């Protein structure tokens, strides 16, 4: 018996777990301190009432013999797939219901999708980036190239014709930088992928935060994306499903290589390795797309948008450079007075009792930068802003 030696190439601890352990150690040593957690991107508002009602009704169905359901379709119930298809249609994007696959979250599918691709593929990943993209490919032993996202390019790297890649990761609005691509910029990536014969794995988990004119919410707003892209989305950050777990992945029928259909490969993988998302959860997710559900989701999102505005207003007052905030729940700031992100993390924790995420944990280009999240409560965000202003106005 041999272990997968690629796991030994991983960093010792997942970034957010490492942050949590450090904060736990600090709070244990300082029980009198009120620590404000603005680091991990977990939501704080409850599920919308329309979602709760739909799930309660589904629970009642499961408690009655006539309406009880056992195993469901691995790719998701038709009622939810049709609801998602309608959501895209209202935004001018035409999809077939069987191009939509229901998952237990975008994170899972972003890792699991790699099952259908050869380990011989070269992967292009932006830096800084959500660690899951890198770690899942390290686990498989793929060759990884990095596209530099820096302050100079607005943390939005563009394709380089001199770089050959087979699998390309794009997250927009980006985690951690909050930067969002325009439709025109994404079109350049789609053109590049088609020329290279590559596939784009497009993480749209934060698409509902986008409001800027000309900015993209879906890769399928571009011409030809259906031939080279897979889109991943989630109910976690928009409808509060971080603890409920539900998302969806769009795999177009037009995404083929020769006589091989990517859609059929993914269907085969899911029917073998996945038993589907619970019926109760899917009923709740479908309620998100009702008129009342949409309204309630927007109410919750408006709270997080106000939090983001509080954070960016704070950075403006202090003269701290940043990206994100306007079209994203993340504010990515240049560490004031520190070249080392982890030292700034320690300083902010110890002096202001505010927790963020050190940018260096997202890649080498994150060194000297820091991520704050708008997902905390309004009260906690206001208090964090007060403490940060007090600390850096000295």
Image: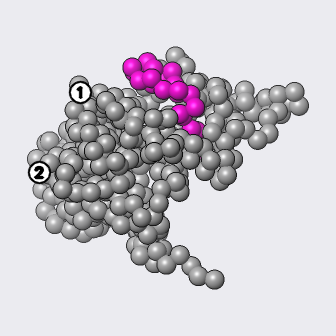
Residues shaded magenta: 84-104
- Give how far across and how far down residue 184 sits, in percent: 22, 32
Residue occupying image coordinates x 31% and y 60%: 362
Q: Residues within 10 Å of mark 2 (few under 14, many from 20)?
A: few
- SS state under label 2: loop
Q: Is residue 341 visible?
A: no
Q: Which mark is residue 152?
A: 2
> For numbered disc 1, what is the local secondary structure?
loop
Quarter-of-image position of residue 66: top right
Tell me if label 1 and label 2 are in contact, CB under 8 Å: no
Marks 1 and 2, how far apart at CA: 21 Å
**Disc 1 residue crowd, few under 14, some 14–19, many 20+, Cα 10 Å:** few
The numbered mark, 1 or 2, whose residue comes first in the sequence reads 2
Residue assigned mark 1: 214
Q: Is 321 placed above or below 28 here? A: above
Left or right, 251 with reference to 144: right
Locate residue 186 relative to residue 9 in the image: left or right: left
Against 59, is 262 above or below?
below
Relative depth, front residue between 168 and 29: 168
| Above-or-below relation of 71 to 93 | below
Return the mark for residue 171: none
Residue 359, x across and y down, in percent = 27, 60
Residue 64 percent location from the top left of the image: 86, 30
Residue 158 or residue 37, whichever sits in front: 158
Q: Percent x, y for residue 129? A: 32, 55
Q: Mark yes or no: residue 117 visible.
A: yes
Viewport quadrant of the N terminus: bottom right
Residue at 39 percent of width and 41 percent of height: 229
């Amino acid at each position: 018996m041999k272990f997968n030696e690629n796991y030994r190439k991983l960093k010792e601890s997942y970034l957010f777990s490492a942050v949590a352990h450090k904060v736990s150690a600090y709070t244990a040593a300082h029980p009198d301190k009120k620590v404000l957690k603005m680091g991990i991107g977990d939501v704080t508002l409850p599920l919308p009432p329309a979602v709760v009602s739909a799930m309660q009704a589904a629970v009642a169905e499961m408690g009655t013999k006539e309406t009880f359901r056992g195993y469901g379709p691995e790719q998701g119930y038709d009622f939810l797939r049709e609801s998602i298809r309608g959501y895209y249609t209202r935004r001018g994007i035409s999809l077939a219901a069987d191009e939509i696959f229901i998952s237990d979250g975008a994170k899972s599918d972003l890792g699991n999708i790699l099952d259908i691709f050869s380990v011989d593929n070269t992967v292009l990943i932006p830096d800084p980036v959500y660690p899951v993209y890198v770690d899942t490919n390290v686990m498989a032993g793929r060759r990884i190239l990095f596209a530099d996202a820096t302050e100079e390019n607005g943390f939005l790297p563009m394709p380089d014709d001199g770089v050959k890649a087979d699998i390309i990761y794009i997250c927009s609005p980006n985690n951690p930088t909050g930067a969002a691509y325009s439709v025109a910029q994404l079109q350049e990536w789609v053109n590049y992928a088609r020329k290279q014969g590559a596939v784009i794995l497009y993480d749209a988990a934060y698409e509902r935060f986008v409001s800027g004119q000309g900015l993209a919410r879906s890769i399928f707003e571009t011409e030809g994306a259906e031939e080279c892209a897979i889109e991943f989305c989630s109910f976690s950050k928009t409808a509060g499903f971080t603890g409920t777990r539900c998302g969806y992945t769009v795999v177009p029928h037009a995404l083929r290589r020769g006589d091989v259909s990517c859609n059929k490969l993914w269907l085969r993988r899911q029917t073998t390795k996945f038993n589907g998302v619970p019926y109760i959860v899917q009923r709740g997710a479908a309620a998100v797309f009702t008129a009342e559900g949409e309204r309630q989701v927007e109410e919750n999102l408006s709270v997080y948008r106000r939090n983001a505005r509080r954070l960016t207003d704070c950075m403006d007052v202090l003269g701290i450079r940043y990206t994100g905030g306007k079209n994203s729940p993340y504010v990515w700031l240049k560490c004031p007075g520190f070249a080392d992100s982890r030292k700034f993390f320690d300083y902010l924790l110890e002096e202001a009792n505010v927790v963020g995420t050190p940018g260096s944990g997202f890649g080498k280009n994150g060194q000297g930068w820091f991520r704050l999240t708008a997902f905390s409560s309004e009260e906690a965000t206001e208090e964090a802003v007060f403490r940060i202003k007090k600390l850096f106005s000295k």
